Image (cartoon, rainbow, N blue to C red):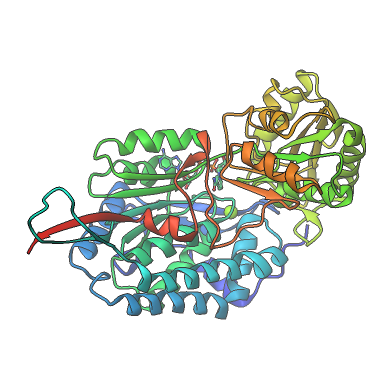
Amino acid sequence: MAEASRSATVGSRLERGQQLLIDGQWCEASDGARCDIINPASGQVLGHAAVAAEADTDRAIQAARRSFDAGAWTGLTPAQRGKVLWTIGDLMEQHLDEIAELESLDTGKSLDATRGGEVPFAADCFRYYAGWCTKIEGATKTLSTVPDQQFHIYTRREPVGVAALIVPWNGPLVQAAWKLAPALAAGCSCILKPAQQTPLSTTRLGELAVEAGVPDGVVNILLGSGSGAGATLAADYRVDKVSFTGSTRTGREILSAASGNLKKVTLELGGKSPVIVFADADLEAAIEGAAQAIFSNAGQVCVAGSRLLVAQSVYEQVVSGVVEIARALEPGTGGHCIGPLISAEHRDSVLAWIETGQGEGATLRTGGRAVEAGGGYFLEPTVFADVEPGMQIAREEIFGPVLAAMPFPDDAAPEEVAALANDSEYGLAASVWTQDISRAHRTVAAVRAGIVWINCHGIPDMAVPFGGYRQSGWGRENGMESLLQYTELKSVVARL
Ligand code: NAP
Ligand code: MG
């Protein structure tokens, strides 16, 4: 597979290697450790990145702590901080082509997707939270317990302190932005750790933050493994908050590591999100939507629609429609292709789930095999029909392009269909496809998920809170809700 032609800027950046950002300085790991950066669409080594040693993680935490305690960032006015965040968004847009190329090479996403979607979206995230800097407010209160004295009572929203931001590989830039922008808007000092597999857009973002005027020590970047730098950040007593996106299993580990100093924890975890198609839906749109929901980014999306629940009378039509779309998807990184999985190991784990599905007796309608294309980690888009709710492929997050379809009776009430949808330990997202307004809203009300789309799937927005019920997480990303999770609330009671 031809790699996206590489620009000179990106070429020299890759040659230099990716470094750690600690206290405003870029540096190698103290023990010189490095790892390769791989392009999953070709299997080729793109360059190398530093791997933070314990001493580097310690220095980054110290730098964040020092900058926070010295008021390096909170000492600016809210408007000044907002301007810096806005500038980061502008700089991202100025360097859109370069960042889009980096993200595409690192993740195997198409350039169309990174240039038209991820980079502008991440830039908008900084602008969205730039606006919030001047709007973080407390309230005044009136006391009832002491009737014959006067008081002035108010609340203050203060930054939570040093925030560790741990990000996965499936949307490195956007997910870093979703954490860094609100944390900075709230006044936190941050330590950002991208997944070891995808450092490229994060280090570029770090440079832009420095260029935009973020003071030394306020944004630190640790490259390296989850079991190394990640685990240390989650456990360290000098860290006040950890915001994590990744698997539910790692979420649990973070939670127990965080229990030492009871740091605040936000978790955006896995999902097994249902796409629910009623018989009266616009089927053409539903078929297209269901296919998009599971095949975009090769199913490596936390809100991937990996369970397809369809009314019996249209079940065959919908399943065959999705199968047809799956068969037409070529492996590659073009706009209408199915992209690679992030690594050979991850592809193997998805293949193992496909084998499990076959062993459980589900009908493999299409796909199921690895595709040899240009050395990349491609996999055929895969559709299983006749899946039973108890099967593992209906329950486990596979995080690949593997759909589990099952029918429900046409005369089932919305609440009964929602009960099927809710038969999962997860509760991240869902979509409901119907033209009947009451059916749509009754289903929405009964589904246990943090975001439910009606007649669409997977549309994000900075203003729309996003996160999980049940084992899909704690807290919300985006909107004011995310911002508040980087704050503490102080009540002040003054007797006059
Ligand atoms: P993961 O193993 O949980 O890794 C996510 C991040 O956590 C990476 O930066 C990883 O570092 C780090 N990490 C791993 N172990 C750690 C530990 N013990 N302490 C601290 N940090 C640790 O997840 P993944 O398998 O790479 O990513 C896919 C998963 O993420 C899927 O399950 C998906 O559902 C979930 N996800 C959820 C959302 C959401 O918004 N809810 C979004 C995207 C992805 P290294 O990888 O560098 O070792
Ligand atoms: Mg990579």
Q: Position of residue 223 (x, y in %)?
A: 42, 54
Q: How many marks?
A: 0
Does 21 appear above or below 34? below
Instruction: Choose top left, top right, bottom left or bottom right for residue 390.
Output: top right
Left or right for 28, reference 325: left
State the quadrant of the N terminus. Answer: bottom right
Does 6 appear above or below 276? below
State the quadrant of the C terminus. Answer: bottom left
Q: Position of residue 162 (x, y in %)?
A: 28, 56
* Residue 19 can be seen, yes or no: no
* Residue 141 can be seen, yes or no: yes
Q: Position of residue 319 (x, y in %)?
A: 87, 37
The residue under the point 32% across, 75% down is 78
The residue under the point 34% across, 66% down is 136
Left or right for 276, reference 180: right
Of 464 and 473, which appears nearest the observer? Answer: 464
